[in-house]
Image (tube, rainbow, N blue to C red):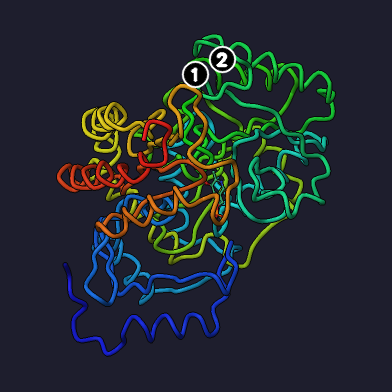
Amino acid sequence: HVTTGDTAATGAAVKAADRAHVFHSWSAQALIDPLAVAGAEGSYFWDYDGHRYLDFASQLVNTNIGHQHPKVVAAIQEQAARLCTLAPGFAVDVRSEAARLIAERTPGDLDKVFFTNGGAEAVENAVRMARLHTGRQKVLSTYRSYHGATAAAINLTGDPRRWPSDTAAAGVVHFWGPFLYRSPFHAATEAEECERALAHLADTIAFEGPATIAAIILESVPGTAGIMIPPAGYLAGVRELCDRHGIVFILDEVMSGFGRTGKWFAAQHWDVTPDLITFAKGVNSGYVPLGGVAISAAIAETFATRPYPGGLTYSGHPLACAAAVATINTMEEEGVVEHAAHLGENVIGPALAEIAERHPSVGEVRGLGAFWALELVRDEETREPLVPYNAAGADNAPMAEFAAACKASGLWPFVNMNRTHVVPPCNITEAEAKEGLALLDEALTVADRHTTSA
Ligand code: PLP
């Protein structure tokens, strides 16, 4: 366990100060008890009382190269000393370099980059670009998805976080994407799931009216909603439907991009090029807020002589761009993308397969690279989720107990609904990954107690 040095602050004082004035996202303010964090390095962070946590959540799946990477910290410090801020209308060396590095890694002709401060704003702007480019209004999005918490983005989201705010959902239509384990199409094989999901989308397009649809937005691999790897042929099939009907294809790679799946962008596993890619999070490991939209030549051309009506004071902020340049260069120098692929194939994937064998609470494991989900169930046969959909309070006790067991052992888990995700930094060492997997293995015995076989 790491000590916090000679800081005078105690965890209790930090927490009290937080509770006095900080209003937390997604929370009932009186019911939360945020952990006071004293510091972080690499794959770990620690509190003021000497407890260290191995971060199997990468915060919010964004610290793709871990905490406090010295090369990125130095780049931010150098940029701060040189030029902290400049409005988006100027040409800035680090912004141009970040855009170049990103454009070189996106597939196809997505060679222009519009910068934002995060993922939701990237989605807002991608949708606006698609609407202006096509002159159409509707946007199709999947259930079991997350696209952010701002107006268009939350309405596109296909999970309960949308419900309280979906009165402004004009023009948004949800459809089902492929997910064989809980197949909306009652399919028995991946090939059948793919074929039926594409037929369902083709029907949705036909009945909504192809000439009214501006865009289809998908996460290449849906993240928060459960890391469902699309069957081979699905994304290519969507691409084909978009081409046939002049619909803009947006892939949201906010979570799946920048090495997370063992490629720069997840769509590259299936050689698919969308018209727009939204990104954020891993682009600079979350050190300074940054997101953006990578734009195809055809859509960029729409705004060659016609102004694009959108912008943000902090678009392409120099500190954020300096962090992105340093992060991408570091990922290249240290082979982080290849390392994530190796972890998925040789460390995390095989270990989780064994864990699934041992634990009746693990219904399925699925993933790629450093991007894995365990679907926890009450019954392996019926696949009844360990907690009901959108469970809260006492209904959610089995997952809460599981999460508490992880934390008590020094593992910080990602937990959502009836799932836990294994999403550590992409540069986590093999030894650290194995340590975390062993702690996860042990904590799952708590979930096992809530299964029908207990
Ligand atoms: N899109 C996806 C796929 C995400 O996972 C997220 C955040 O988790 C967002 C968009 C929203 O990003 P942000 O929270 O940076 O606005």
- Say left or right for 324 vs 316: left
Graded by Cα atoms within 10 Å as few (under 14), some (14 to 19) or many (20 or more), the crowding at tag 1 reads some
| Whether residue 436 can be seen here | yes
Q: Reply above or below: 108 against 99.
A: above
Q: Which residue is mark 1?
A: 231
Asked whether disc 1 touches disc 2, contact meaning CB atoms under 8 Å apart, the reply is yes
Image quarter of the C terminus: top left
Q: Earlier in the sequence, mark 1 or mark 2?
A: 2
State whether residue 282 appears in this view.
no
Where is residue 291? Give x, y as percent.
52, 53
Q: Indicate the secondary structure of the residue bearing disc 2.
A: helix
Q: Amino acid at mark 1?
A: Pro
Q: Give the residue pinned by disc 2.
A: 193
Against 62, residue 12 (above or below) is: below
Q: Residue at x 47, y 54 (%)?
A: 96
- Asked whether mark 2 lies closer than 8 Å to ligand 1, one says no
C-alpha separation, residue under disc 1 versus residue under disc 2: 8 Å
